[in-house]
Image (cartoon, grey):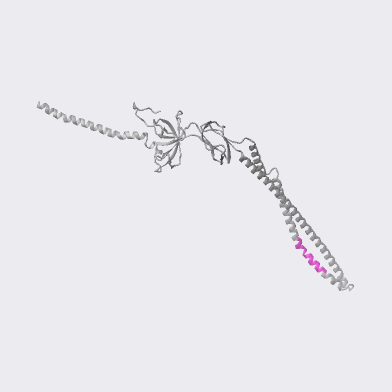
Amino acid sequence: MTKDFKRGKMRMPLRVTLRRLAGFWFLLAVVALIPVFLWLLSRGGGSERFFGLVEADSESVGSVDTARIVSIEVQPGQRVQPGDVLVRLDSTAQTLDMAVQESRLLEYEQNALRHRQTLLESERRCRQIVQEAAVALEAERMNRARDEAELAGLKAEMDRLRPLIEKRLVSEIELSSLRPKALALEKTVGGYAPLIEALQSRHAQAREDLREVQDLLASSSAAGGASDPAAESLRAAVESLRQSSNREPMVLRATKAGVVSRIQYRAGDVVVGGEAIVRVSAERARTISGMLTQGQLLEVAAGDRLDACRAADPDKRVAPVRVVSIDPEVMDLLDPFNPTPQFPLRGRRVRMEILDEAVVWLPGETVVLQRPRWTFPWPWRKPST
């Protein structure tokens, strides 16, 4: 009995030791699996989780010029089709534009008429100057010819008297009386050359001035006719505005199908050109835009599929989306894309499309996006829809 007790006492420490070793290895295995579970959890969210906004195609309809709203033909929430009338505007601006264009055309025609009358008066004066210069030139030429003829007669008479004086048939007094007159005529005839040259230059300049005025008059006659581009443009503008004013008041129509989401003015208000009056949005939103930080960009690329769920959905039901494009420009992340606005972050904008046609999300809604992660099919886990 003593031997059996001693033998059992020796076996007990070996059994305890084996149990302790088994517990130690089990604890070591559990500790080693903790990083693996943490890595799997981080694969589902972590750095790849970001926010996005649901976007839809929309258009803002407004007047090009300042106008008064006659009536608004739609209501918020009303469905419209391309070509439906949204707003009717007063055509007072068109009437004012037509009056302005008509006054410009009248002023242009009056200025052209006054310019032509001025050119006609200038032409008359130039013709008169040319005629006076021609008369003065011709008169001086006749005077020179007369004085030259008289001087030639005196010289001939003096030549005739010299032989007679030598023969003492005529007195020296007759020859002496002709000499002063001949000297005066020679001086007079010598002064005709620069005078006639000056008159010729004056006549040529007057003819050149007359030619320039005639050219201007011819060009003004062509411009004032039916082929004048400026006058034709003004007449076309007046005619176009006149036809527009004869039609119905200006109307603004929808260019795409959608729902009226916003009306910013009422009938009777005056709007400035470029201001939106009615906003039409698409009924279904198929696009999501978000911002990726520089760290998230390392693991998300165009073509990847992500899971998206509404931020306000308590069940966190997800829908598949596909990354369409990532903008190349890096910019500051603003709300709601930056979860910590007090700490500035930088990233790039990403655009995604919703793949599930049954998903209906509202434009402007915030969604949470992340990579699809593998989950163990626990029996009590509610399936995602």
Q: Position of residue 47 (x, y in %)?
A: 38, 37
Which part of the image, by quadrant, shows the N terminus?
Answer: top left
Q: Quadrant of residue 316?
A: top left
The answer to whether 107 is drawn above or below residue 142 in the figure is above
Above or below, comparing residue 306 to residue 235 in the picture? above
* The stretch drawn in magenta includes residue 191: yes
Q: Residue at x 21, y 32 (%)?
A: 20
> Which stretch did the figure color magenta?
181-196
Q: Depth check: 322 or 308 in front?
A: 308
Taking 178 as reference, is 230 left or right?
left
State yes or no: residue 350 in magenta: no
Apparent side of residue 336 relative to residue 112 in the rendered image (left or right): left
Position of residue 24 in the picture relative to residue 158 (left or right): left
Q: Is residue 22 left or right of residue 256?
A: left
Q: Quadrant of residue 329?
A: top left
Q: Residue at x 86, y 73 (%)?
A: 173
In x, y percent, where is residue 103?
A: 66, 44
